[in-house]
Amino acid sequence: MIKATVNGQSPFTIQTGKEISCNEQIVNWSAIQVPAGSYSIIMDGHSYTAQVLKIDRDAKTVTLEIAQQVYEVSLEEPIDQLLAAMGIKDALAHKVNDIKAPMPGLVLKVLVEPGQAIRKGDPVLILEAMKMENVFKSATDAVVKAIKVNPGVAVEKGEVLIVLE
């Protein structure tokens, strides 16, 4: 059973198997992907066109546009529900890791400050290694806790450059 929450409203349950049910009511539907990348859905005799705007696999959310309305759907799989029931809901969440030097190099520029909120993919530091500039980007959403290096300083492989929380 999957729990789905649409736009933060009360969750509903989806049961899959021979038949698909939503809140214990059988749903008759079919869907196909059309050439434009959207989906044509027929559900209980009504036709809909859905466009997938964004999929965030880590957060288990899908953002859809149906009939010019945007819906954010959050999904809870059985393992998520079990962990929540056991009080360890965030056990599968990604741990925020500090940013470390993957190789020896020279810090050219630090692009963030302590206390700054950063998002996945934001550039945080430029390191020169083997005569090439390498832009380090955040692997996750986080807050910069501390900066352990300064521009112009040489660093060794594995050295912590930026501490995240």
Image (spheres, rainbow, N blue to C red):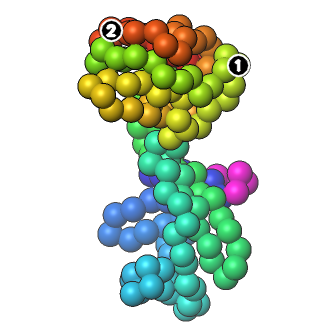
| Residue drawn at 67 percent across, 29 percent down | 117
Of the two numbered discs 1 and 2 on the same chain, state the one appearing first in sequence: 1
Horizontal side, residue 16 vs residue 6: left or right: left
Find out whether residue 6 is within the magenta segment. Answer: no
Q: Which residue is mark 2?
A: 156
Residue 121, given in percent of the width and then of the height, sits at: 50, 40
56 relative to 15, above or below = above
Image quadrant of residue 141?
Answer: top right
Instruction: Identify the mark at residue 115; answer none if there is no mark.
Output: 1
Q: From the viewer's perspective, is residue 62 above or below residue 126?
A: below
Camera-nearest label, 1 or 2: 2
- Residue 67 coordinates in the image, percent (x, y): 67, 82
Q: Main secondary structure of the magenta part?
A: loop
Could you tell me residue 41's position as x and y percent? 49, 83
Segment tinted magenta in the rendering: 7-12
The amino acid type found where label 2 is placed reads: Glu
- Estimate how packed mark 2 is, as few (under 14), some (14 to 19) or many (20 or more) residues with alpha carbons within 10 Å: some
Q: Is residue 162 visible?
A: yes
Name the amino acid type tagged 1. Gly
Residue at x 38%, y 71% (from the top left corner): 19
